[in-house]
Image (spheres, grey):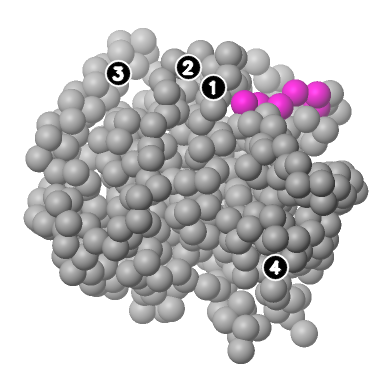
Amino acid sequence: MNSISKVSGTVGALTALDCIELYRAGTISPVEVVRDCLERIDAINAELNAFCYIDAEAALIAARQSEARWNKRQPIGVLDGVPVTIKDLTLTRGMPTRRGSAATSAAGPWNEDAPLTARMREAGSIILGKTTTPEYGWKGATDSPLTGITRNPWNPKLTPGGSSGGAAVAAALNLGFLHQGSDGGGSIRIPASFTGTFGFKPTFGYVPQWPLSAMGALSHIGPMTRTVDDAVLMMDVITRPDARDGYGGMTYKADVSGETESLDGIRVGYSRTLGYADVAPDILRVTDAAVEQLRGLGAEVVEVDPGFANPVKVFATFWFAGAARLIARMSEAQKELLDPGFLECAIRGEEISLAEFKDAEQARFDLSAKMADFHASFDLLVTSTVAVAPFPVGKDKPDGFSGWVDWTPFTFPFNLTQQPAASLPSGLDDAGLPVGLQLVGPRYHDAKVLGAARVIERRLGRLTPPVLQMDSR
């Protein structure tokens, strides 16, 4: 039997909200749930490589403590006993954070939690381990010299995308229920699209960050889950403030508790190409069909481009400069251990002048103003999430593209503008692989994105990797 055929079962079909209700009813225990998750991780991780670090012993100790609290009807938080994962870019006490890089030391000490990790612990969640990322999250596929290749559960010969590829695989197979991703140019949304899961990039500043990513205010932190409701639950936890966050001060307000089955009153601008993207025909077909479903749900849909030129050069200026900052204090011996593609980005960043960087800043502000004007007329912008299908592992980009942002034209502009954006499954392409639908909202209007995503999810349904479909027969 192939190892990835062992990943389903009763616990594997639960959501985080299901899990909490079952704990409350006393029909299942955190120990049972955590043990099941660890067994399924053990069954598939050698093949798919979603996790770079697993602490089974600590997770089971925490599960027994949670079980005792639930037995007394005294949970310590809204996530008590819920198994979760943290991306290997995010500090986690007691677990190494290597950032996917052999140039980092495994020695630690690992004695601090990042704000997100701290909030998840305070809510009672149980951290199973760290998920894989390319080196420093630099690209849209997940592999690195340190941790090797992460593979897509829909087809292990293909990439799950990146940089939150390990989290996406864990979400697709329910190896834990809530998964942390980070997104500096699409790193939550790309793998969500490639694995048929839900990923949400909140408005920048709503989720506290420390230390700040080298990519600065491009990088957002958010949830990756199988359902919108689980992402909403996670957002309510991780948006609680942290004094260490230098961008702190914004209060998250996204009440999406109201039950609705329609998009009545929602005005949607649908852009097939943003005016410049080269999109695979079958992906456009799936996206067009999904947009028709939005009309059926009551949305007013207008096919329109938001009206900006491809901002790839602006984005690259920030991205390359961030990479240069990362290697500035590295020794030559450390640089020799880096992914050659990442090192090339950093070297290009060293050549950027201050004037070029300031010009990019101004272009970023202009793009933000353009999108603010667009959202004066439209509640949401809808696009495909990615322009291509998942491609073979071991590559940074599909054949025919010059760089990773060229095949992700729909995601990175909205890191420049710091807007909330989500990817949810919209169907299957001609090869039977997942396609994502991207919803983009105005800054600080995360509730519009999450509320619409919930309604659309109920109409379009979830996607399940074939291995789980076969096991559930």
As drawn, the label of residue 361 is 3
Give residue 168's position: percent from left, percent from top: 56, 55
Q: Amino acid at mark 2?
A: Gly
Foreground label between 2 and 4: 4
In the picture of the structure, the residue carrying the numbered disc 4 is 11
Foreground label between 2 and 3: 2
In the picture of the structure, the residue carrying the numbered disc 2 is 248
Say whether disc 1 or disc 3 marks the residue closer to the N-terminus.
1
Work out whether residue 245 or residue 299 is closer to the camera in this orientation and state it.
299
Q: In this orientation, does residue 461 appear? A: yes
In the picture of the structure, the residue carrying the numbered disc 1 is 241
Q: Quadrant of residue 400?
A: bottom left
Element on which disc 2 rests: loop
Q: Are marks 2 and 1 in contact (CB under 8 Å)?
A: yes
Q: Residue at x 70, y 60 (%)?
A: 25
Element on which disc 3 rests: helix
* Position of residue 299 in the picture relative to residue 465 (left or right): left
